[in-house]
Amino acid sequence: MKNLEKIFPAIVVLLGALILVSAMKTPKDDPGVMRDQAFGKLPVMFKGRVKPYDTLARSALRLISERETFKDLQGNRRPAIKWLLDVISDVPHARRYRVFKERHAGLIRRLGIEVQPDHLYSFEDFMRNHRDALLKLYDIGQTAQHKRRIKEDRKTARGYEERANQDEGDEGYLKSIDTELETYEVAAVNLGEKVRIYQHLVNEFVIQSRTDGKATITRLRSYIDQIERALANAREDPILSVIPEGVGPFRSITQADVAALKSGLGVVSGELYRESEPLRQVLEQSPAGSEARRAAEAELEAINSKYGPLVLENASLGAFGDAMVSLLTARKDGNVHAFNIALERLQRLTVESTNAKLSGKAGQLGFELFYNHFSPFSFTRLPALYLIAFLLAVFSWMGWSGPFKRGAFWLLVFVFVTHTATLTLRIYISGYPPIITLYGTAIFVGWGAVMVGLILERVFKNGIGSASVGVIGFLTLLIANYLVLDEGDTFKMPQAVLDTPFWLATHVTTVTFGYTATFFAGALGAAYLLRGNHLAFPALGLASLGIGIFRVSTGTGAGDTIGWSLVIAGLLLIGFGALILSRKVRPSFTKDTEQMLARMMYGVLCFAMLLSFVGTVLGGLWAEDSWGRFWGWDTKENGALIIVLWVALVIHARWGGMIKARGMAVLSVFGNIVTTWSWFGVNELGVGLHSYGFTEGTRFWILGFAITQLSLVIVGWLPRAWWQPTSDVARVKQGRASGSAGGAIPDVAMSSDTPS
């Protein structure tokens, strides 16, 4: 048994390493098939960043399907790169892939589509009956967007006037319109966006001028006009897949095609004019319906048909573009040999390219491909290890304390090293500091919490630091996995207002460390309440259960994994709380434990105050540099100030004797709500200079998290009878016997041994 106690931490770390190493294997292409994985390594530029096609495939499929894999028509699970290749090659059966995720059954019925148990639908489902479902979806989405615009216009008198004029109505009419969106309308907007992403992929790669078999001069000119109008009015950034042979900019297939067709028309224009001009003069001079006119029209049509293929022969897209078209054509035709030959040509051209955009990118693209396959922040990787560490720390409070504590600590050390290496890899791939999106803040907060928790655990060695780190690490990466469904590409280029590496590395990093410290103080406060109060576990369980049931029952359906996870977690917490209330389980809450928690909370709050204040000042300096003013009472600026004021309030209340250990715990837990509002909540307002961080659909989760924290706050204010007798009640009786007075908040200021 003693030998097991010694080697137990090593066993835990080894198992954690095996979990991660097993996920690092990069898939290979089988011999004799189209080399999809090799194609995924090729570069493409989209939204200002050169990335592998594998990243484009995963990002697009994640936005559409909420997964990075899909099932083919035989029901086999396939990688995203196969889906992308089939879509951009216009393979007919690609339209039957069921990849569109929509849980709102009411919307699906309105579109006339049969509801599927797994909530997945194909593009063909929308195209049946002369695109009836697609047109209905467009109409519902347009109505919803109209309501949103009116709701925004109501914020200003000018908006009233402009919208009233546009709608040929008056202000009263405008006020009478119901702008509250039905749930199916919100779902329609989101589903419409998914369909638009799919259509954008098709439109960017499928070039009809070379595939419809009707390359006449008239059709080609009409095609050029149509594509140029589409490019001018495009809502989405072009997918730049054609690498120029020289130093020019990347172009999309369609852009390269239009340029090539114009060049081809220029080559044949002289001969075309020489042959067609006499016939045009005949048309001008001949009356309608005459034999001469009919003969001239027939000859012109023959000339159009004759020179159309000649234009295509002289319309080269360049070496890279022609190879890409050959690859896509081979894919559509199912020609394995031709596909792999074109792929080898593309690989050679990529290696030989002297384009400045590709200079030095080979290493970054290779690491990004590895990162995609490893996917360190997915549920079965680092989040799972954080959860295991949390459970080990909790088990250490119930027995076999030493091995469980050491196992949790060293597992977290291993996870911290991996988390650090992953963040470093992200910095190298993106070329920016670690925080440029909300997704980046989530994984950075988790990393910072691990660092703080390991330091505290090393000092106090009580398992509380490890347990807090496990919870924060798991929850922040859970948030990151949710955010990536909105952001798609986890290496997105920063918004123009954020594209300043110095301030990203100073202000954003510092203020995010402030978020981390405030959340960690809140986690310690939650640990205090959970260990000290009999009702804390069942209260938190009831809150989680209620949120989960509401999430599952309000139109999202049984496929909502997070909703059902909350239901299960709530039931487990209620069950554990029942064991506590029945006195079959009693969490340890000694005087030493209370003192340690108080010291830990106080120290972390001081750091939170320092980091939040410095980060906010740095933000003001950035605003002065970018916008010409230090402070403008913008919503995000106000949110940062609220955190500083709240932490200052807690610290000064402790200094003034208004609160002590328990009061500090309650206020620290409420600080989680304050920080969440400043982190995500102000973005939901959609106003101000910092509105670039808006994320659709987070309002529900902000409110849900606030409810869970309020349940703990309420528990923290319950009478003393609900607290562990070995700490609070005993000391209160001792205080009364000695005639000591409580604080300004008597039910909270009960511990007199908390350090000043």
Image: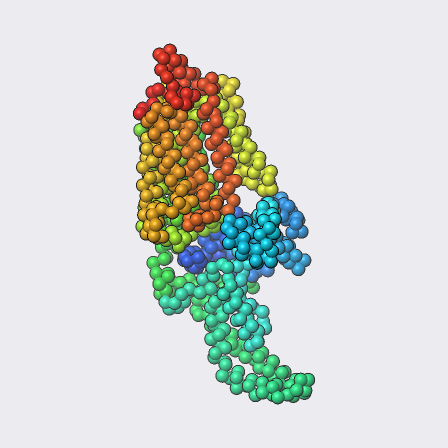
Is 629 placed left or right of 86 in the picture? left
Instruction: List x then y, in percent, for residue 545.
Output: 55, 32
Q: Residue at x 58, y 38 (%)?
A: 552
Q: Work out whether residue 583 can be spotted.
A: yes
Q: Which residue is drawn at 52% across and 22% down?
A: 578
Instruction: List x then y, in percent, for residue 345.
Output: 43, 65
Quarter in which the C terminus is drawn? top left
Instruction: List x then y, in percent, for residue 165.
Output: 57, 58
Q: Work out whether residue 25 can be spotted.
A: no
Quarter in which the N terminus is drawn? top left
What residue occupies the far top of the structure in this picture?
A: 737
Choose between 15 and 471: the one closer to the eye: 471
Instruction: List x then y, in percent, for residue 656.
Output: 33, 26
Query: Can you say whether 442 is above or below 466 in the image?
Result: below
Query: Can you say whether 660 is above or below 303 in the image?
Result: above
Residue 348: name its quadrant: bottom left
Is 238 placed left or right of 551 in the picture? left
Choose between 295 and 139: the one closer to the eye: 139
Q: Residue at x 58, y 42 (%)?
A: 556
Q: Residue at x 51, y 20 (%)?
A: 581
Q: How many labels does the image show?
A: 0
Choose between 153 and 522: the one closer to the eye: 153
